[in-house]
Amino acid sequence: MMILEGLPFAIEPMQLEDVPTVSAVEQVVFSMPWSSGAFEYELRHNLSSTYRVLRYLPWHQESDAERRLSRSMRRLLRPGREDRSLLGYGGLWMMVDEGHICTLALREEWRGRGLGELLLVSLIEAALQNAAAVVTLEVRVSNLRAQSLYVKYGFRVVGERKRYYSDNHEDALIMTTDPISTEEFGARFDALTAALLARLQAERDEPAPLQPSLVP
Ligand SMILES: CC(C)(COP(=O)(O)OP(=O)(O)OC[C@H]1O[C@@H](n2cnc3c(N)ncnc32)[C@H](O)[C@@H]1OP(=O)(O)O)[C@@H](O)C(=O)NCCC(=O)NCCS
């Protein structure tokens, strides 16, 4: 788990029990969503993949044991209900020595606070832990928000896949980092991560956005 000292957030490995909520977010965020079966298959069988979820834990002072207990309690109290503490998720496939970001999504009402960036940081860290040489991904040409996030972390457009997305035949850009184990990449990544954590600390007392499912 990524240590986010003093912040009401945690990055954790995605678990099978997260799939219903991940899948519910996926259906809202993407026009070509993965099925819940696809996420389950990935978690059970794709041993070279890493999936992370971002949680909002305003009760972050609790110990790990208390946190696990309160998670199970919430599930018991609200069986089958979406877990609103799960704000977003991301996935990384290892393809030989390349880390490939296969998904990244954040609930819409939580965007613009650096939390999508936090998930991206956790995926790049996973790539570093897996000794990936570079990190790569595909992104829609129209998705300027995601592209500027990737550019911030050193991704560059290295090619395109014409009519890659079958829903509207949109092209995909292929974006790749420079080698991530270099001192240069490491120094830039550390500086960006430090700035992000400082930003999240500065914003830590901002109210949580209105959660649609809690609105009567
Ligand atoms: C992509 C996504 C995860 C980014 O998360 P976010 O919370 O919106 O973005 P953050 O607040 O973390 O922003 C981090 C950086 O992204 C870029 N960014 C964020 N919002 C932006 C906007 N409206 N316009 C341009 N750039 C933007 C900036 O580089 C920003 O850094 P800055 O704050 O220093 O300017 C989120 O928008 C999302 O889930 N989008 C829908 C799904 C998606 O497109 N996934 C990617 C598929 S490849």
Image (tube, rainbow, N blue to C red):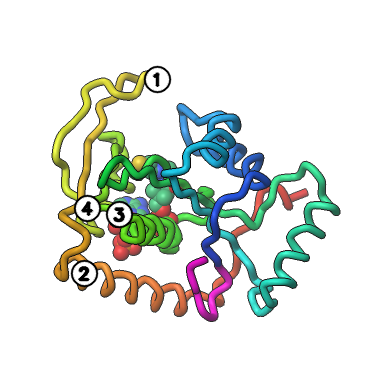
Q: Name the quadrant containing residue 190.
A: bottom left
Amino acid bearing label 4:
Ala
- Labels 1 and 4: the sequence-earlier one: 4
Taken as a whole, is the magenta stretch helix, strand or loop? loop
Q: CA distance from mark 3 to mark 2?
A: 14 Å
- How crowded pointer 1 is (Cα within 10 Å; few <14, some 14-19, many 20+) is rated as few
- How crowded pointer 4 is (Cα within 10 Å; few <14, some 14-19, many 20+) is rated as some
Report the number of numbered marks.
4
Amino acid bearing label 3:
Leu
- Labels 4 and 2: the sequence-earlier one: 4
Q: CA distance from mark 2 to mark 1?
A: 36 Å
The stretch in magenta equals 1-9
Ligand 1 within 8 Å of disc 3? The answer is yes
- How crowded pointer 2 is (Cα within 10 Å; few <14, some 14-19, many 20+) is rated as some
Q: CA distance from mark 1 to mark 4?
A: 32 Å
Do residues under tags 4 and 2 come within 8 Å of each other at their CB atoms?
Answer: no
Image location (x, y in percent) of residue 24: 62, 38
Question: Residue at 47% across / 34% down in the picture?
Answer: 30
The answer to which of 188 and 183 lies nearer the viewer is 183
Which residue is labeled 2 in the image? 188
Question: Residue at 25% across / 27% down in the picture?
Answer: 171
Q: Name the quadrant containing residue 21.
A: top right
Which residue is labeled 3 in the image? 149
Ligand 1 within 8 Å of disc 1? The answer is no
**Does the magenta portion include 56?**
no
Question: Residue at 19% across / 65% down in the picture?
Answer: 185
- Labels 3 and 1: the sequence-earlier one: 3
Q: Secondary structure at mark 4?
A: loop
Badge nearest the viewer, 3 or 4: 4
